[in-house]
Image: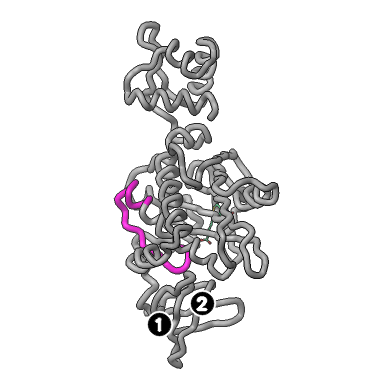
Amino acid sequence: MTIDVQILNALRAAAGGSVSGTELSQSLGVSRAAVWARIEELRSLGYDIEASPHLGYRLLAAPDVLHADDLISRLGPPRVIGRDIRVFQSTTSTNDVVEKLARDGVKEGAVVFAESQTCGRGRLGRKWLSPARKGLWFSVLLRPEMRPTEATRLTVASATALRRALHSQTGLEAEIKWPNDLLIHGRKTAGILTELSAELDRIKYVILGIGVDVNFSPADFPAELRSQATSLKAELGKPVFCPHLAVAILKELDHDYARITAGHFADIAEEWEKHCTTIGRNVTIRVGARQISGRAEALGDEGALLLRTEHGHLERIVGGDVTIEE
Ligand code: BTN
């Protein structure tokens, strides 16, 4: 744990009260001058920390930016997801950064955030708009003991976790559109890009890339997306504090990953079906050059969509572009 995490933890534990410089220097095992230098550094990052010669330090406010130490301090000890958090000002795609970490042998649970991405990507080779301070753009490294055919479970679990976090932080009810979209009032607010490296019967690692349109104004979306996309700010009429939302999402992801590894995918599937707008609807799914139409009946064991075709066959669909008919 870095000194900054420990200082932020101590200031937060004081719950609006002060912590003396002597107390901090003793508990951290560094000089009072070193504590002062770290406090000055935190202030330069935007933390409002009051310093009083008699009472010590008091945290008044934190900035609406992502700092790894701040996220670690807010998160507390996770089971898996978030035990290593890194924040980049800008990167090509956080999925690329996590892929490199995966190849370097980094443990599962590492999370990489970027304030902005220059080559953010969505599913099916689409571009993902990721400007600074407008959203959460991050990727999680997982090494689940699973067959590659079960990987859709992780997308399903991420969508349920994300939906719960959006609800707890904003009160907004998002719907899930299979397999990976979160919609509010029918417009896309968040998406998940699951990429994996696998052998025939075993996953080596999975990268869960998550993008949430948090503080976009309608005018920030390109004209061609305006009717299909929305943000939390646009829906709420006020901005959302990104560090709170980021931590809430990581906690929910950690919770659902534990449910999956404990063999409780069925509980997640049940929750997912309750909030999924695709189930029970007539849909057309494009998978490469193929197009299949039918009624989305349920979620299969491995996270696949079970589609009853016009000919009465039940097809198991693991990916594709869904258009809801009617
Ligand atoms: C989709 O809906 O098509 C998936 C969008 C996923 C976007 C996120 S943003 C963080 C991560 N890095 C990327 O390049 N993509 C994912």
Q: Quadrant of residue 121?
A: bottom right
The numbered mark, 1 or 2, whose residue comes first in the sequence reads 1
Please name whichever residue, 22 or 67, is drawn nearer the observer in this view of the structure. Answer: 22
Q: Quadrant of the C terminus?
A: bottom left
Give the amino acid at mark 2.
Ile
Q: Quadrant of residue 279?
A: bottom left
Q: Is residue 242 magenta?
A: no
Q: Judge the density around disc 2: few (<14), some (14-19), many (≥20) Cα neighbours within 10 Å.
A: some
Q: Is residue 172 magenta?
A: yes
Q: Is residue 138 visible?
A: yes
Q: From the viewer's perspective, is residue 64 above or below residue 212?
A: above
Horizontal and vertical percent position of residue 126: 59, 63
Q: Residue at x 60, y 49 (%)?
A: 94
Residue lying furthest right in this view? 104
| Beta carbon at label 2 within 8 Å of ligand 1 | no
Image-based side of 86 in relation to 214, left or right: right
Horizontal and vertical percent position of residue 73: 45, 33
Magenta-drawn segment = 165-181
Please name whichever residue, 98 or 82, is drawn nearer the observer in this view of the structure. Answer: 82
Q: From the viewer's perspective, is residue 174 above or below residue 90?
A: below
Q: Which residue is mark 2?
A: 317
Q: From the viewer's perspective, is residue 211 above or below residue 87?
A: below
